[in-house]
Amino acid sequence: MLSSVTRVVGRLLPSATAISASRAMATKTIPLSDDFLFRQLFDRESCTYTYLLADLGSKQAVLIDPVLELAERDAQLISQLGLTLKYAMNTHMHADHVTGSGKLKELLPGCRSLISKASGAQADVHVADSELVEFGRHKLECRATPGHTNGCLTYVCKEQGMAFTGDTLLIRGCGRTDFQEGSPTALFESVHTKIFSLPDEFKLYPAHDYKGLTETTVGEEKKFNARLTKPLKEFVDIMENLNLPYPKMIDKAVPANRVCGLQF
């Protein structure tokens, strides 16, 4: 019987069995279509990911979870690529940074802000579960995924096999549930019914990562997420005993984000 490792000159190397098992864990993902642009941008201060998506035929674009301090960077990139920003949109009303949506409306005339109606935040466009956000021929399906906040949305691009999960589902983790209408039970149900119900090969992109990871898949999280692979009762117990510090930006970010990132 082969062991999972083979000893070679004092070193342990994976056996053929272990390598085969490892490869089986990796899921072949859906390639992006030729007319779809995708860029993942990063804010070092808040470890926030901002996502630029565009239809290369019409040049219409959307920007998910922009950060105020980097709005000029984002606007410059959009202009350099010859794109027109249709929506500056958020997955939820953030507590760890101020959104760049309002600033982008100033920098790129014609851009409109978008967020879930359940968030309670101001925006030009409010969306709800099952509604579509269209840019060119491409579209994002809005899936309500409350739990981190009441207004959390996951945006699903079915054709490209990808979803943007905000703070609801992180890579090998999830958003906290101890403030802003947080509910561990609601978050658990959201992930299992609205995200884990997607095909295993769908790529997932969170609003944050603190360990240098950039993407995951539905299949990976169903297997390796240390919290969300637990039964509901155990998950709730974990979330209610994290004892996390008070968010340092919440008192500034939430009031600003209620008004599209601009204090009037």
Image (cartoon, rainbow, N blue to C red):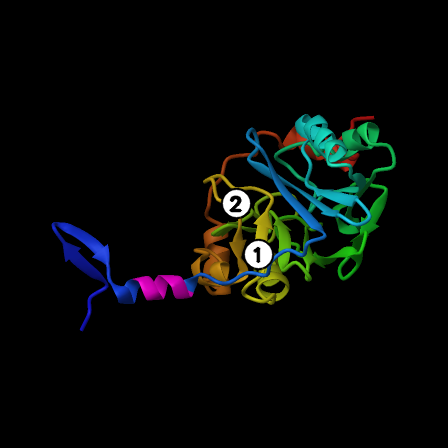
Percent coordinates x, y for residue 131 in the rendering: 79, 59
**Residue that badge 1 annotates:** 203
Residue 165 located left or right of residue 130? left
Secondary structure beneath label 2: loop
Measured in 3D between alpha carbons, the distance from the residue under mark 1 to the one under mark 2, in whole angstroms, is 10 Å
Give the quadrant of the N terminus: bottom left
Residue stretch in magenta: 19-24
Give the quadrant of the C terminus: top right
Residue 12 located left or right of residue 56? left
Seen from the viewer's position, the closer of residues 116 and 106 is: 106
**Residue that badge 2 annotates:** 214
Q: Residues within 10 Å of mark 1 (few under 14, many from 20)?
A: many
Membership of 84 in magenta stretch: no
Among the two numbered marks 1 and 2 on one chain, the one whose residue lies closer to the N terminus: 1
Residue 244 located left or right of residue 37? left
Question: Could you tell me which residue is drawn at 54 percent across and 65 percent down?
Answer: 200
